[in-house]
Amino acid sequence: MVHMDAKAGMPHFFPALITVGVVAVILFAARAIAIHVEQRTISATAPEAFSLKNQGLAFQRAAAHASDVLPLYGSSELLGQIPERGGNFFRAAPTGFQLSPVGKAGATSMIMLQKIGALGSDLHGKKLAISLSPIWFVVPATSPYWYEGNFSLLAASKLAFGDVLDFELKRTIAARMVQFPSTLEKDPLLEFALKRLASGGRLDQIAFCIVWPLGKIQDAVLDLQDHFAALSYILRETKSVPARRPRMLDWPRLIAKAGELGQANKDDNKKDKASRSEGQMVAGPRDEWFREHVNGAREWGDLELLLRTLAEVHAQPLLLSMPLDSRYYDEVGVSRLARVVYYEKLRALARQYNVTLADFAEHEEDAAFLYHRGPQPEGAPSAHLAAKGWMFYNRALDDFFHGRIPSN
């Protein structure tokens, strides 16, 4: 009787199995089509900075596989529509490549490393650039608001359940990620896995291995959602592919022209230089405060994790740093003598990890390099690149892409 019941159930099993197989084939084919469309339209999407590109991985992966696209990860300095901004400037690939900006306000090293760790082997041998904001290294720790506003479940899950990073690095990253518990509340599986990774104990490692297959299934589902969202975006939003216009760039002329846009600051610049030149290398009343904040900033540890991640995925990075806002720091009593500590620490890390760095320290006193937004809630200034600053960035990016030593 039992034997006959088993036989009766078999006909229902095979149609279900066939249905699952057909659905899997359809989804696989749809994903392949989406990837093909993403790669075919990369010239149209690469120059743009938009939410889906920042939160997902599909557009970032397409940029990673394009030989004529240079990814640039950064923060709010990547946004805005000034013509000199990198995405705009390289839109028509004047020197043979486009720039693909990824980031928004508050995207710090921890956010970037999750994206890069999630892309993993897609970045093997790939040149990319990282734009750093000095404010990150003056405030004591990353604002939860910054982190939460940039957190990507897909990137975090791909990093946690991926197999590119070694266990020790992944454990250290997980220990930082669990310090932002609100980002994990909606995904108990990822929360459990990260806590097991962060602990690092023998039983925790076994527990992580047990849930690892579930994590891979979650990654597959999130990956499909990402590709379908990317395909939908391309069909709805993508404009025509920009025509390529190769030309020789006269960088000194372009920089001088961009500097003229800051002409309104020129008189202030001369006045500031005259008033500051005598005392800029003399100790200021808030020098000790500045040194303590910079030396104690949690962001240095996060930047080191980012550099370790870049090394593990075998990417070829360029670090860019905006100069400190000298106008603000001079006004509050932080001398140039004290400000040197930021550049020294940054250069030391770049040397340690053999990473190319352009820090633009010599442009601190150039009022046309940055535009000033004033102090933020954290009490430190948040300056952005002005037209002239962007033109210096663009020259460094062009040098880097073409294998030359980037100019500061």
Image (spheres, rainbow, N blue to C red):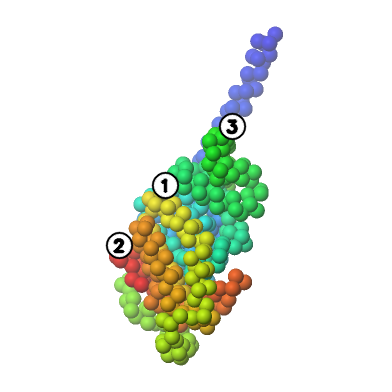
Residue at position x 56%, y 52% in the image: 177
Q: Residue drawn at (40%, 74%), measured in percent from left and top?
A: 361
Residue type of the residue flagged with mark 3: Val
Q: Which residue is mark 3?
A: 20
Which residue appears at 51% of the width and 46% of the height?
171
Front residue (pair 59, 290): 290
Q: CA distance from mark 2 to mark 1?
A: 22 Å
Quadrant holding the C terminus = bottom left
Of callouts 2 and 3, the N-terminal one? 3
Query: Front-most of 382 and 399?
Result: 382
Which of the pair 349/279 is nearer the observer?
A: 279
Residue 194 in the image: above or below residue 318: above
The numbered mark, 3 or 1, whose residue comes first in the sequence reads: 3
The residue indicated by pointer 1 is 121
Whole-number angstrom distance, CA of label 3 to CA of label 1: 30 Å
Q: Which residue is mark 2?
A: 403
Q: Residue furthest left?
A: 404
- 155, above or below 4, in the image: below
Q: Name the front one of labels 2 and 3.
A: 2
From the top left corner, tell me how far across and down residue 100 is, in percent. 45, 61
Residue 283 is situated, as x and y percent measured from the top left of the image, at 45, 80
Determine whether 142 is above or below 324 in the image: above
For the N terminus, give its image quadrant: top right
Q: Residues within 10 Å of mark 1 (few under 14, many from 20)?
A: some
| Image side of residue 274 versus residue 12, left or right | left
Dot 2 surroundings within 10 Å: few (below 14), some, or many (20 or more)? few
Image position, residue 385 (x, y; %) = 47, 74
The amino acid beneath tag 2 is Gly
Mark 3: few/some/many CA within 10 Å (<14, 14-19, 20+): few
Q: Secondary structure at mark 3?
A: helix
